[in-house]
Structures are given as C-alpha cells and as structure tokens.
Image: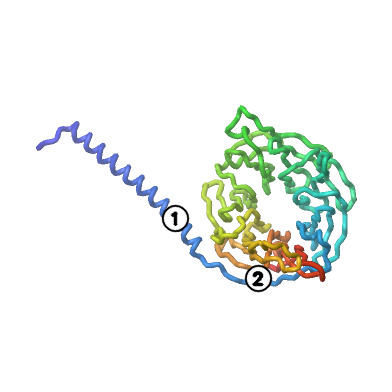
Amino acid sequence: MEVSGVSKKRLIKGVTFIVVLCLLVGMVVALNSQEAFCDGQQKEKQVKIMPMPQRKILSAEALPAELKYVELQWIQGEDKVVVNLRTSIEILDINTGKREKVLEIKNVYDWPSISSDGRNVIFTELIPYERSETYIYNLKGKKKEFISKGIVEGINWSPDGRYVVYTRLNKEVYVFDVEEGKSKKILESDFWDPELLGGEFDVPKWLPKSNKISILTNEGLCVMNPDGTDLRRISNEVPGNYQWFPDEKRICFASGGGVFILDIEKNIRTKIGKASDHPRYIPMDDLSLSPDGKKVAYHYAIFGPEDPYEDERRPPPQGDSEIYIYDVETKETVNITNTPNQLEEFPRWSSDGKRIICKVDESFFDGECWREVRIPIVIEVK
C-alpha cells in the first residue's frame, strides 16, 4: 500500500517524538541510577579505625562541679580556648592547663562567640525575672559593651572580625559594627512576602571571601548584601547547622539523618556520615570544617540506658560517642578516637588544621557520690 506524502510526514514526526521521549526517559533513569550508585558507594565504604594521639588538658578530680556544662571554642592562632562555664568565661591554656577567669557572669545563654582574631567575645547573659542582655567583651582590654536587649541567636563574625550578624526572635536580622559599637537592622520578616520573608530567619553566616551574608528562611538558603539588599534564594535546602567551604560553592551540614555536603551550583547533596540505627542514637547536629575545607569532623552519640534508681552512689550509665573525620578529596572516613563507653563530643579544629579540641564525659567517685564532668581533650590530627 502506498503512503501519501502527508502521512509520511506525520509518521516521521511520530517516530521522532517517540525516539526523543525514549532518550529523555533513558537520561533520567541514568541520572537516577548514577546518583543511587554514588550513594551506594558512599554507604559501602568502610570506616577506618585510626586512633590519633590525644591528651587530657585537665583531670576530672581537679575540676569544679560546674564543668559538667563546659563549652569550648578556640582562640584562633593561639594554644588557648575560651571556656563557657555558664557562670563565668575562662581562658584555658591547652599546654599547661592553666585557667584564667576573664569574666564573671550570672548565667550564659548558649555558646560564647569568639572573633577570629581572639580579641572579643559576644555572649547573652540570662537574668532571672528580668530581661536578658547581650554584650561584647574585649578579652585583652577587659572592656564590656552592651549590644542588645533580650536573647540574640545565630551570632556570626565577618572574616575580618569587624562586623557581627545575629537574629532576634528569628524575625529580625542585625549587623553590629564592633568599631562603632552600633547595631543596624538589615532585615525583618514580612507576612506579605511568604516566599522569602514570611517566616523565620535562622543561622546567618558571613561567606568566607565575598562580602555576603547567607541565612536560612522557610523556603531555603538565601544570600544577601551586608545591608540586607539583593536577598535571593540559592538553594531549596534548609540545612540547619551549616558551614561554608572556602570556595563558597559548597556547604556542609549536620541533621538527624547524618552529615552532608551540598554543592550549591550543581544542587547535588552527598551524604558523608550515616545515622545510626541504634535505639538510643542521638541525632547529630554539630560538625566542624577544617580551615582549608579538606576535612569534616563530626561525632555520633549513643547514650547508655538511664538508671531508674538514680542512685548517686552507683556509677552513671555509659554510652558511646566517637569523633570521625571525613576527607573531602579521598572520600574516606576515619574514626580517630575508638574509645568504647566514652563520650567524645563537639569537635573543633584549630586554625592550623593540625589539632581538634573536644569534650569527653568522665565520671568518678569523690567519696560521697558519683560526679560527672566534661574534660577538654586535644587530638593531634595526622
């Protein structure tokens, strides 16, 4: 049977459409398979166990009871850390163990935030039955200045240490000028702009090189100028606690599902740390990126069963928490502690990338009852 010219054209168009459709479907399947394969490779890689040299800076018996709440942060470029004891802030020399109390306060809310040059610390002081207040304190000049009423969150320093970005009530974003001692509101939640500004703001961060600020909104991760202009969304991800890589093209973040690296430009998320299936597993919410962006340190935590009798004369139940390092280039993960029944938490890199300071929960009997304190330890990273 002879086919007319019109029918031939229709037939060719139909066949072409089917071929193109098949190619598109094949590409989608291939991409999904490739992504699944990459994820599979990531999960199948075994974690190396390579305990690295560590040393306690202080002994448990020598510490006061309030060190149970210790929080640590490096003073960049020095062998010292700032210690938050809730009732005071101290400087701890990691080589000698010498403690220097620099500030007495009623009660510190959250971690004190240290400038990159180690000169200033910002903290919020909780005052019962009164308003809380946020201050900046110069560690060398012993000078304390008021910043804001109420609790401020998400404190983050600019790379040069002159400016600080923070949020209030997750509805307002401010930039504080350290030299001028003044705060300026740069962003406020707007009910009529639900796409970007209708919800809450969280975790503002200065980008490492460009003069930009990133911030989380209800709709994802956004960037803007330091004056709040040119706000735009760069990712639909809402990564929670995140850190920028030096190239400003990627972020790493921790969530209950594990630890991830997100390529902003390619919109590709890679899981580098898998959450545990243990029934007493504590979701990860903290990590530390090395200064050169080549390694990510994080921890898993599995708590021991609770003691139903709460007998202070019995040793407290133990759990397990290890510090891991993920190498971004080799994609290898190493357990650098490997200490069963010991809780290492909250790793922090030194500015030279050669050491990590973290906390170890330790218990001992003082003759009357069991005490639990958090011991700062330093790990030498090979």
- Report how far apart the C-alphas of labels 2 and 1 lie in the structure: 33 Å
Q: Earlier in the sequence, mark 2 or mark 1?
A: 1
Q: Residue 345: x percent and y percent?
A: 68, 61
Q: Residue 144: x percent and y percent?
A: 88, 46
Residue 130 visible here: yes
Q: Is residue 361 left or right of residue 62?
A: left
**Colour setting:** rainbow
Residue lying at the far front in this picture: please name it.
309
Q: Quadrant of the N terminus?
A: top left
Q: Residue at x 25, y 41 (%)?
A: 15
Which residue is label 1 attached to?
Answer: 36
Q: Which picture quadrant has residue 348?
A: bottom right
Residue lying at the far left in this picture: please name it.
1
Residue lying at the far top in this picture: please name it.
192
Mark 2 touching mark 1, by CB under 8 A? Answer: no
Q: Quadrant of the C terminus?
A: bottom right
Q: Residue at x 43, y 55 (%)?
A: 34
Q: Residue 264: x percent and y percent?
A: 56, 47
Which residue is label 2 attached to?
Answer: 339
Q: Which picture quadrant has residue 257?
A: bottom right
Amino acid type of the residue tagged 1 in the rendering: Ala
Residue 375 visible here: no
- Mark 2 element type: loop
